Amino acid sequence: MTVIYLVTLKFRVYPLSLSLSNPNELSQEPFTLDGPLAFAEYYKKRLSNNADWRIQYLEDILITKELEWESNIRSSYLLPATLQGKKLTITTPMGFEAVFALDTKASYKLSQKQHAKRWESSQILLRLGRRDDIIKMESLRNSLGITLTRKTKLPSSLSQSGPYKAIDYTVKLYTPNLMWASVVSGISQKKLEELLSILRKFGIGKKRNMGWGDLLEYRIYPLKSGTTITPDYILHVHENSKFLEMWRPVSPEKIAELIKGPQRVTQYRKFSLLDSKIGYGAEKPPYWRRHLVIKSALFQVS
């Protein structure tokens, strides 16, 4: 039987995952924990014994036609959470508040009523430079004697113009939480501990060199068995109605199959789509592959 874990993460500064919403404007986006865990797994297997692992990593992503991380780990989004005593409350992408009781194991208790989706709670200016990365990659290319598939004209170190200049972006942040949580499967608890210890060293998310996503501590709770929660979905019961929320990326084809009904993920027979968010992403690591996905979806089920 597959064991499912509830993982809580406490950060010094919360993790960033950003997408371009408007010119010179980035918005905070949810991201799954299995991406960082898959990288930690790849680092442990292939990179950790290298004196400078970054050289091997760049060789892999620049030379290998398609870098695949053969990982069985699967998780929900990394979601903002609050902890009061032994009660953990997670805010889902569709605005439900899922309540868990924590002890040696975690148990899913209930979903509080759905509230309006949160708008950005604050905005900051973030300076992102694209010049240094190009120069570093060219230096690596020269040292290894390799040819990149596309030649890039290097910017002058004295020039402050052109496509590689540093840019000030407005970043819209939706939550300031320092505690986050995710539901994880496809891995043993011992191995999960090992990978989280690696992420504690590297951090999680974007702009880690600025201190974002600095992981302080983590906790792993085996989740009591049931069909109401998996890394793919969570079941909400509210006012005598039942709702199934997909809380990780899924292909539009799978959503269509779910509505048509030949294959069911639960015992319910009727799935009525109430809300969804579409965007570009991937269904599994590595998440830099971009195609059309349903980022989250909410069904009424019966």
Image: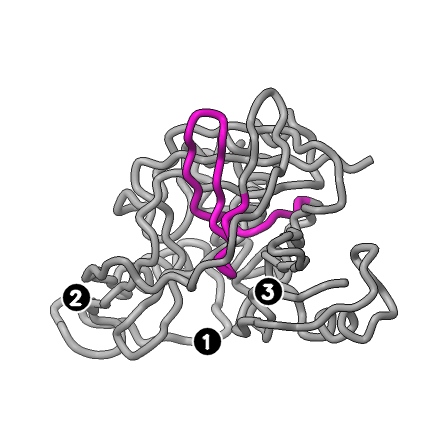
Judging depth in this view, the residue of 56 and 20 nearest the camera is 20
Seen in the picture, residue 71 relative to 243 is either above or below; the reply is above
- Pointer 1 residue: 150
Name the spot of residue 247 as percent of width and height, x first.
Answer: 59, 56
Instruction: Kindly indicate the quadrant of the structure image that contains residue 192.
Output: top right
Q: Residue at x 34, y 52 (%)?
A: 175
Seen in the picture, residue 116 relative to 260 is either above or below; the reply is above
- Pointer 3 residue: 282
Crowd rating for badge 3 (residues with CA inside 10 Å; few <14, some 14–19, many 20+): many
Inspect the image, locate mark 1, and give the three-letter code of the amino acid beneath it: Arg
Residue ranking furthest to the front = 239
Name the spot of residue 265 as percent of width and height, x first.
Answer: 79, 57
Give, as a single range, the part of the protein colored magenta: 73-98
* Residue 236 located left or right of residue 86: right
Q: Residue at x 49, y 55 (%)?
A: 31
Which element is circle 3 on? loop
Crowd rating for badge 2 (residues with CA inside 10 Å; few <14, some 14–19, many 20+): few
Judging depth in this view, the residue of 295 and 191 nearest the camera is 295
User: In front of the other: label 2 or label 3?
Assistant: 3
User: In front of the other: label 1 or label 3?
Assistant: 3
Judging depth in this view, the residue of 52 and 262 nearest the camera is 262
Q: Residue at x 47, y 29 (%)?
A: 218
Name the spot of residue 157 as percent of width and height, x first.
Answer: 17, 66
* Disc 2 and disc 3 in contact, CB within 8 angstroms: no
Which element is circle 2 on? loop
- Pointer 2 residue: 157
Residue 65 visible in rendering: no
Judging depth in this view, the residue of 67 and 16 nearest the camera is 16
